Amino acid sequence: MRSVLVLPLLAGLAASIPSPLQQPFGVQDEYQGDKVNVSLYVMSRCPDARLCENVFEGVIQKEGILDKINLDVGYIGKLNASAPLGVTCKHGTLECIGNAQQLCLYNHLPVDKAYAIVQCQNYPSDFPGSIGYLDSVKKCAKTVGVDWDQSGVGKCIERIKHNSTTTGDVEEELKRLGKEAKKLLRKNIKETYDRNVTTSCTIDISSTIRSGGRRRCVVDSGVWRGCDDGHTAQDFIRVIEEEYRNLQSKKDE
Ligand SMILES: *[C@@H]1O[C@H](CO)[C@@H](O)[C@H](O)[C@H]1NC(C)=O
Ligand SMILES: *[C@@H]1O[C@H](CO)[C@@H](O)[C@H](O)[C@H]1NC(C)=O
Ligand SMILES: *[C@@H]1O[C@H](CO)[C@@H](O)[C@H](O)[C@H]1NC(C)=O
Ligand SMILES: *[C@@H]1O[C@H](CO)[C@@H](O)[C@H](O)[C@H]1NC(C)=O
């Protein structure tokens, strides 16, 4: 899932860039071997994804952790040539649009900013409420302080500049969605599908310690399953630190 591979800005790189906020994850061919691969598999209008993203926020916010992981976010759905976006999403077309918008965030912003916007969308008690509507993501980008145009997010999400607010019409929202967003959506959903991941939310942490090469934790209908190492933010941080140390010690051999 290279397209959503999230490269936290390296200290040196950040120093050479006037405004780190405006930098996409970019530089994706950089050597990533010494970081822990972490994958979140979600759906934008899924309550389990909301729960899981909420817990994982504690990991994202942990100081220094973004330098130790490659985070990718995979959206769950099915390729479907007769669907308007070429994919079918469990919670409908609006969810497909929401997924596509969030992929634009992850592809054009540093991970903490992208994540903060997603969390802003997840926050309201009427969740999934307006997720998928252009207004929702636009408002949250503003809340987080991301420049819609300069960041590249706007061009990715919004096909042409719109002035009208949410109409509640999914057809209208479909027309608003940008070309890049659609492309990212199909690619990402295919990649998730090819990995046989079907449950939102699934958290995979790659492992060089455990057999099977990964540690998986799933939330399904509000219940955590298979989380042998625990499922709090502290547990995920501990596992990541452990895997990271192991990777560094291998590198030094
Ligand atoms: C992380 O994922 C990349 C790309 O899939 C892979 O090449 C690399 O070996 C993985 N690293 C670890 C430590 O698992
Ligand atoms: C594919 O999309 C069409 C049009 O949205 C829909 O009617 C159909 O049920 C979808 N097929 C599957 C397998 O989801
Ligand atoms: C945008 O919408 C506002 C409020 O509806 C309206 O006053 C303004 O003229 C519109 N601008 C354009 C460029 O359509
Ligand atoms: C997904 O499942 C198919 C069919 O069971 C299998 O052939 C394939 O190797 C699996 N892919 C992954 C990445 O596990």
Image: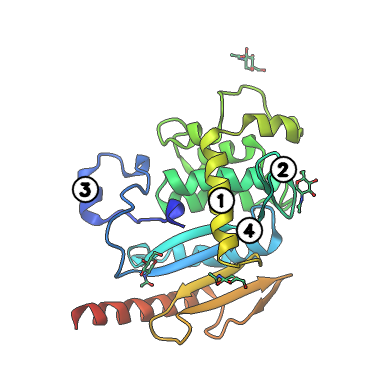
Q: Is mark 2 within 8 Å of ligand 2?
A: yes
- Which of pointers 4 and 3 lies earlier in the amino acid sequence? 3
Image mark for residue 229: none
Q: On the image, which quarter does residue 7 sit in?
A: bottom left
Residue 102 shows in this picture? no
Q: Which residue is mark 4?
A: 76
**Residue 40 image point, x, y percent:** 54, 64
Identify whether 80 is placed above or below 31: above
Q: Are there few (<14), some (14-19), or many (20+) residues within 10 Å of tag 4?
A: many
Element on which disc 2 rests: loop
Residue receiving disc 1: 118
Specify few, some or many for label 2: CA neighbours under 10 Å numbering under 14, 14-19, or 20 or more: few
Asked whether mark 3 lies closer than 8 Å to ligand 1, one says no
Q: Identify the residue at image location x=27%, y=61%.
A: 31
Give whichever of discs 2 and 1 has the lower sequence position. Answer: 2
Which three-letter amino acid code belongs to the residue tagged 1?
Val
Displayed-image quarter of ligand 4: bottom right
* Number of the label disc, if any, that sits on residue 15: 3
